[in-house]
Amino acid sequence: MTHVPNPRPTGDFRTSYAGDRTLFATRFETNAVIAGVLFVLVSPFLFSDYILSQFIIIGIYGIAALGLNVLTGMTGQISLGHGAFFGFGAFASAWFSSRGIPVLLSMPMAGVLTMAVGMVFGIPAARLKGLYLAIATLASQYILEDFFARADWFTGGTSGSLAETANLFGFQFDSDGRYLYLVLFWVIVSFVGVANLARTRDGRALVAVRDHYLSAEIMGINLTHYRILSFGLASFFAGLAGALYGHYLGFVSAEGFTIILSIEFLAIIIIGGLGSVSGSLLGAAFILLLPQAMETFANALATLVPAISQGTAYIKQMSVGAAIILFLVLEPEGLVHRWRLMRANWKLFPFSH
Amino acid sequence: MADNGEILLRVDDVSLQFGGLKALSNVSFAVRKGGLFSLIGPNGAGKTSMLNCISGRYRPTSGNLTWNGEDILRHSVNDRAHLGIGRTFQNLALFGHMSVLDNILVGRHHKLRNNFLTGMLYWVGGARREELEQRRFVEDIIDFLEIQHVRHEPAGTLSYGLRKRVELARAMAIEPRLILLDEPMAGMNLEEKEDMARFIIALREEFEMTILMIEHDMGVVMDLSDQVAVLDFGKVIASGAPEAVLANEHVKKAYLGEADELLDELADTAERAIA
């Protein structure tokens, strides 16, 4: 990713090593994140269920994309099977909760189980790279899809399985507003966790494996260990997000977890910014809101030009495609990069660097 | 060969073959503890292949590598950092997208104990304390190599000379007992070379590291090393004290060809070095 300077505001000095390694670079960023969290906290009192459901889905997709970003962005390993792991988490959590485990506990347990499965599929990844790895992970997508359809005891087979409503000491997460809090909790835990990972030993090791695996090995990094670990971490977040998704819908069926979903996750991290923690959430918001923005756009166009009112659905689809292509041409490094450029511009104006 | 001092690394009859190509044949030498051993030779002589055998990139077809009386080849590549072997690369192998600081911290990998779980928890479980301790250690290296001003820059954006320094910093962070330097001065201007020479001397004297260096700059080799081995077509054609090696007829032929002006130039260099 191209480097964009981020000068600190005048007078904001770093006087300790701890102060130099904080989660957020500036006080403004810290405040912005706190404001964002507060906004989500009060949103159930402000918005309709429809808008809240969008927040929930963005949060869930954001967690899954974060996992893929650990794998693809940080470690440089591509995966075309992320959607299947997402589905595996949904089924696993539904299965755990049907055995009497409280839903709030079954969600992280589903994450851990998915992590174990992901690490098994990650074993060939320790030896494969690039396109070969893409094809190997494609195999994991199809193997898992087949498993969903056949393993009646686990997934309910073709009829799917029911996922219970989460509850905490009698507090039912049964409305969108309440469920949003649960999703928000896991979003914060996941994103802070990965941001912390990025500034500690194993996170650095993952990036080292991506940037130059030969010298990483000389520096004492066990390549096999870290490649499999990164598959495990990616699968954990996919599984956790899948569990949240399953219990939100209340019903899990295999049709939702196809290769299309896996590619959608890849699109999210590419548009958000490869290797960027916050980019995962931005990308999820972009990919999920774009079709709706384009629908509004197509409808507005149809009112102006009544002749095309029959074709708004097509116009919507085509505009989504066009927007993504334009985005990739104009900002191949993702929303996060665009944001950094704007920030640098603002701070350095009228100078360019 | 070694008349005094303990042997840290012994290369014994090492051969390396790629299909029909013999990159190294029956190479033997010994690196004394605390010494500076230089490997020289024309391009393609097998110097870097030799280093790769020691650091683990290649596995010798035959022969032994003994580290402190222990067989190195039994250790996996990533284990060798733990043994105390660090290295720099000829063609710069930094982690381009990471900051200089993080690059150097990667060198501390085998000294750190936090894992992905404690790392994610950061504040609980000691990762924070440990990271900050290591930061202190790394800052000492940064001070020593005078790269404070770029510590937050991504390594890939630095100039060539600075990148070479960051490579050295990263290798130093391993706290190796033996550091392998692959052409530390290649492509540098005079000033940068002088700095690098100063650092190499300090590595030996202050940090008490043993150095095995590949270098083409004969002035540097003569000035700094206390032992030299000359490789040509994968064979050691001479080894010993620098002056003696330079006087060797084989070396003159193999390394410099037989052009008289080159020989004269070399003789001048040698004289200056000895003086």
Image (cartoon, rainbow, N blue to C red):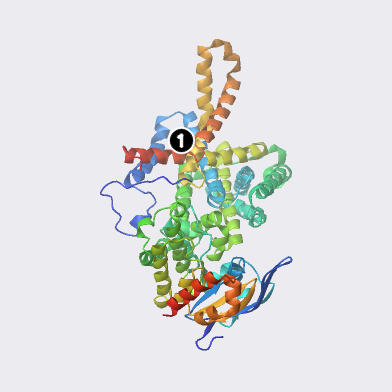
Q: Residues within 10 Å of mark 1 (few under 14, many from 20)?
A: many
Please state if A305 lies on the left or on the right of B188 as rendered.
right
Q: Residue furthest left?
A: A11
Q: Quadrant of the N terminus of chain B?
A: bottom right
Q: Quadrant of the C terminus of chain B?
A: bottom left
Residue B3 image point, x, y percent? 53, 89
> Is residue B209 in view?
no
- Establish if B22 lies above or below A127: below
> Is residue B197 in view?
yes
Residue A92 image point, x, y percent? 62, 47
The residue drawn where x is 52% and y is 25% is A294
Write down the chain letter for disc 1.
A
| Element type where label 1 sits in the image | helix
Foreground residue, B157 or A121? B157
- Establish if A9 lies above or below B122: above
Specify the quadrant of the image occupied by residue B129: bottom left
Please state if A159 lies on the left or on the right of A218 as rendered.
right
- Establish if A121 lies above or below B129: above
Number of numbered labels in the structure image: 1
Specify the quadrant of the image occupied by residue B63: bottom right
Kind of residue sitting beneath label 1: Gly
Residue A103 image point, x, y percent? 55, 46
Residue A323 image point, x, y percent? 53, 29
Foreground residue, A71 or B48? B48
Foreground residue, A77 or A236? A77
Q: Residue furthest front?
A: B260
The residue drawn where x is 53% and y is 54% is A211
Residue bearing mark 1: A177
